[in-house]
Amino acid sequence: MTDEWLTLSDAAKLLGVHPSTVRLWSDKGALPVHKTQGGHRRYKRSEILLWAETNSRSREEALQPEGMMNEAVKNVRMHISEGRLQEEVWYQKLDEEARSQYRLSARSLFQGLMTYISTDGQEAAQEAYAIGYEYASRARRYNLSYVDAAKAFLFFRDALVEAVIKVYSETNVPIKRAAEMYTKIHTFTDEILISLLDTYRKLESANH
């Protein structure tokens, strides 16, 4: 019985965690996993039991900020692709080229935030300024007001925050750690928003 094959859900039950946690650990290479020809994850009971006994450190590493953020970004992409952008008034003002640029702009926010988290905030000011400048200059280029520019940024920021909360709740991250991550996200993104508004004002003044 110790060598029987388990599904992802079975492995999650055996380890006492949410299936999303097992998926994350597997994708990070922290948990031994096998793939069927159809691409489904399968686990050997003996390997899972051995891992649970001897690899608590790997389990902890799988829940480091970088791994969590990668999972959150996947959720954000799904969130955006579900059509919520179409409901945004500022988005409706854009042509197809501009919409494409804004969808791509989400990546700079995610990458900047991951860099900020993984480097413990070093060079955060420059990173925040650069991203804020990008959002401001794009808004000006596509004739959006500074209010719409801020709304566009906040849409992507809020989508990311929602995704992070979802991942952290599903993987049973301690409340203290989740609160620390939440604070870091808002500290960094607040700096971006300030940069965005300041840059927009300067660009507007330069054109008068």
Image (cartoon, rainbow, N blue to C red):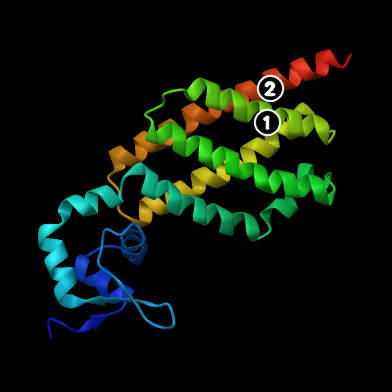
Q: Where residue 158 appears, x then y in whole percent?
A: 56, 42
The answer to whether any part of residue 144 appears in the image is: no
Task: Name the kind of residue labelled 2 in the image.
Answer: Leu
* Quadrant where the N terminus is found in the figure: bottom left
Number of numbered discs on residues = 2
Q: Where residue 186 appears, x then y in whole percent?
A: 49, 31
Rendered residue at 58%/27% (across/down): 192
Q: Name the residue at the front extreme.
A: 37
Residue 10 or 88: which is nearer the viewer? Answer: 10
Callout 2 crowding tier (Cα within 10 Å): few <14, some 14–19, many ≥20: some
Callout 1: SS: helix
With 15 as the anchor, is 19 left or right in this view? right
Q: Which quadrant of the view contains residue 130?
A: top right
Q: Where residue 177 appears, x then y in whole percent?
A: 30, 39
With 114 as the anchor, is 35 left or right in this view? left
Rendered residue at 42%/37% (across/down): 182
Q: Where residue 51 appears, x then y in whole percent?
A: 16, 64
Callout 1 crowding tier (Cα within 10 Å): few <14, some 14–19, many ≥20: some
The answer to whether any part of residue 174 appears in the image is: yes
Callout 2: SS: helix
Reading the image, the residue beneath label 1 is 134
Task: Name the kind of residue labelled 1 in the image.
Answer: Glu
> What is the CA distance from the residue labelled 1 to the residue labelled 2?
11 Å
Residue 197, numbered circle: 2
Rendered residue at 55%/52% (across/down): 76
Rendered residue at 68%/31% (across/down): 134
* Quadrant where the C terminus is found in the figure: top right
Q: Is residue 168 above or below residue 119?
A: below
